[in-house]
Image: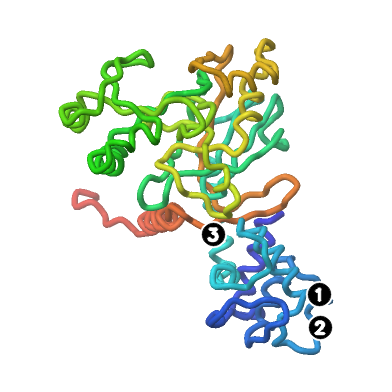
Amino acid sequence: SELPRFRALAAREGRDLPALGAPPRKSLRPGDRAAGLAEVRERLSAWGDLGNAALAVPDANLYDEALAAGVRAFQARMGYEADGVLGRSTWAALATPFPWRLRQIELALERLRWLPHLGERPFLAVNIPMFRLFAWGSVPASGAPEFSMGVIVGRALKTGTPVFVEEMEYVIFQPYWNVPRSILQKELLPLIRKDPSYLAREEMEIVQGPGDDGRVLEATDEALDRLARGELRLRQRPGRKNALGPVKFMFPNDDNVYLHGTPAPALFGRARRDFSHGCVRVEDPFRLARFVLRDQPEWTDDAIGAAMQGQPSKRVSLTRPLRVVMYYVTAAVIPGEGLRFADDIYNHDRKLDAALRARHAREMTPRAPSPTAR
């Protein structure tokens, strides 16, 4: 139903649906006055986020509470903080032409076509630009998810989280964090050379050999040189500072990306959450562990809680692999929430749109006849 609705809205763009002008110089709050608010009301009404009664106001330039309520509804739809403050980001989202919103829906449908048939097996799906994880139990994928939670994904332009479908095979409670070589070279090694106490402070250690039982070495100049050459590795011990939190969820893949907890849960209070080096941090690792281990009765809530706080690290294989879908759509209908949009944080929509238009242009271009054709 949303696709034809947005086709109709796209047809109205520039005809009987006014465009927004430049944003105000400062953010607007209820009680403020500014030009252009009549157009804001019109566009919010078109979205369905503002009642018709709010259009008939005696002062079109007053940012009143009714308009602020519509702005809050729109901000929630866009995944922004719903604070009712009409600033540049919200203004830009409102000003985005409806033909592009329609295109976002079309691109989302195109990407969903690429996914394999998911059947009725339980699975997890992470929508990267919406910063959300969804968990489906033994129901068709067309049904409502059992639950959802916030996630933190890879940083835009630097360490974006990849798109793929893999099978989760095991979880590790109280994991070590083996620092990836790229992070070691670009970020940590210069800090360690400058301040050797950094290792003890961050509960890190230099290790020789594979596995959790590798030999721990002193942070001598020689050890640091060997670490820089890749002969040794750096890891962080399990505990309250560990970058992976109390548990990580493993599904082997070429990008070495996985789900894990975090020692910094306050970041989930932010609306935009692309902060990681590529892996996905989950808001509620306990609930996710309960879902993942649901078919293994020995893993009660008490057992999971104890493993998340215990020592040493503990690996638990799943009795049945769990499919994990990492996908990217900036328009989606969320059960119980309605149609939601997201910013194109990795610029994937623009690239796919350009590629599809280029392909269409090639297909529509008449081919020259072959020189040998009769």
Q: Answer left or right for 64 relative to 280.
A: right
Q: Residue at x 33, y 26 (%)?
A: 205
**Figure quadrant of residue 66:** bottom right
Measured in 3D between alpha carbons, the distance from the residue under mark 1 to the one under mark 2, in whole angstroms, is 7 Å
As drawn, the label of residue 279 is: none
Q: Residue at x 40, y 55 (%)?
A: 351
Comparing labels 3 and 2, the label whose residue is closer to the camera = 2
Q: Which residue is mark 2?
A: 56
Q: Earlier in the sequence, mark 3 or mark 1?
A: 1
**10 Å crowding of disc 1: few (<14), some (14-19), many (20+):** few
Whole-number angstrom distance, CA of label 3 to CA of label 1: 27 Å
Q: Position of residue 295 (x, y in %)?
A: 67, 15
Q: Residue furthest front?
A: 197
**Location of residue 308 in the rendering, given as x and y in whole percent from the top left corner:** 58, 23
Q: Is residue 111 visible?
A: no
| Lateral position of residue 9 relative to residue 328, left or right | right
> How many neighbours does mark 2 have within 10 angstroms: few (below 14), some (14-19), or many (20 or more)?
few
Residue 103 is marked as 3
Q: CA distance from mark 3 to mark 2?
A: 31 Å
- Residue 205 shown left or right of residue 316 in the figure: left
The percent position of residue 327, horizontal first and vertical second, equals 51, 41
The answer to whether mark 1 and mark 2 are in CB contact below 8 A is yes
Pointer 1: what residue? Answer: 52
Q: Residue furthest right?
A: 53
